[in-house]
Image (cartoon, grey):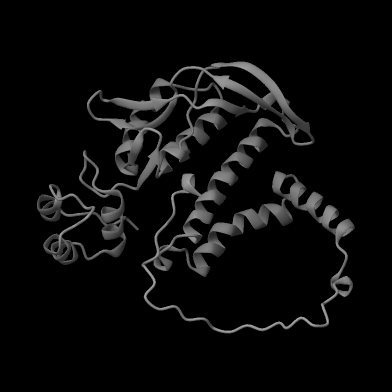
Amino acid sequence: MEESKFSEEVIEQIKDIIPWGLSDENNLLIDKLILNDNLKTRYKTYGLCRECYQPNTSCDTSDFGYVYWCQSCNATRFEQDFKNWTSGDHHVDELVQKSQLKAKNYKEVIEWYNYQFEDVKTLIKDKSGITYTASWYGDLCMLEWDYVRNSWKRYNPGRVILRYLHDEPDNPVEFLKKVESRIAMNDIIQRCWDADPSNRPNANELYSLLYKFGFDAFFVQSSLAYRQVLEAYKINSSSFTGIKDIKLHPQAVYTSKLLTFKDLPNPQNADVDQI
């Protein structure tokens, strides 16, 4: 279902209003004009996109100040640029493009670069492959769209974690599936943690989202998920002591009760960088 958007009439009345620290008069106006709770929350939390005047999908704090992101406008920019680059591998291109179209903030974006690393050092070597650290030279990681310079604002992340596809015990396609699964699971977790219960997925939606992961894990023996579950099962089976070995303190009292809290502030999502 297509997401609701502000009408041109609503945009015309609110585009010059700063959504933070609203006056009582503006608060009443916003409540009257914006009936969709999700749009209203996004507007008050992230502000309006300077290009389409729809609510941004994120507003993160960084060392460079506030970073705003409009999924719709940035997805259009990414899509228009698809023809200008390729990794040379269809599967890699597909993963990168999918992440760019779905990204709701700059942290969810995957980009393709030519090799620009130096001072590469081995960090750890285990069954999952070899992990390296490296220095990434140049201001490469994107933050947000710069409307003055008409280009991406970027920064240098410094030291980064590096993996080589040819080092992976699984073939590159399986490795990319693992990366894609982690991105998908991270999105599900963030939605489940949303401070507003109405924004969290319901049981039916969660079942649909997680079914594919469960199917691969238990029925597709060639999948990476299946092998990981099998290995975890073997480890758990050899280390589990059993409930009968758990001892309770003879003087312990175990109880539970329903707690009520009054006058609590409205729930608000935390910034991951501040946790």
In terms of depth relative to the viewer, which is nearer, 38 or 251?
A: 251
Q: Position of residue 124 (x, y in %)?
A: 74, 30
In terms of depth relative to the viewer, which is nearer, 15 or 115?
A: 15
- Asked if one can make out residue 221 in the rendered structure from this viewpoint, the answer is no
Locate residue 165 relative to residue 2 in the image: left or right.
right
**Residue drawn 10% across the image and 50% down it:** 12
Task: Work out which residue is located at the far front of the displayed protein and give it.
Answer: 251
Q: Position of residue 201 (x, y in %)?
A: 47, 63
Q: Position of residue 40 (x, y in %)?
A: 26, 59
Locate residue 120 relative to residue 26 in the image: left or right.
right
- Total labels: the figure holds 0
Q: Position of residue 94 (x, y in %)?
A: 50, 34
In terms of depth relative to the viewer, which is nearer, 62 or 225?
A: 62
| Quadrant assignment, res 125 | top right
Vertical placement of residue 67 versus 121, above or below: below
**Residue drawn 35% across the image and 27% down it:** 153
Locate residue 271 relative to residue 239 in the image: left or right.
left
User: Where's the N terminus, which quadrant?
Assistant: bottom left
Vertical placement of residue 222 versus 21, above or below: above
**Residue drawn 17% across the image and 61% down it:** 30
Vertical placement of residue 223 versus 43, above or below: above
- Asked if one can make out residue 4 in the rendered structure from this viewpoint, the answer is yes
**Residue drawn 52% across the image and 22% down it:** 87
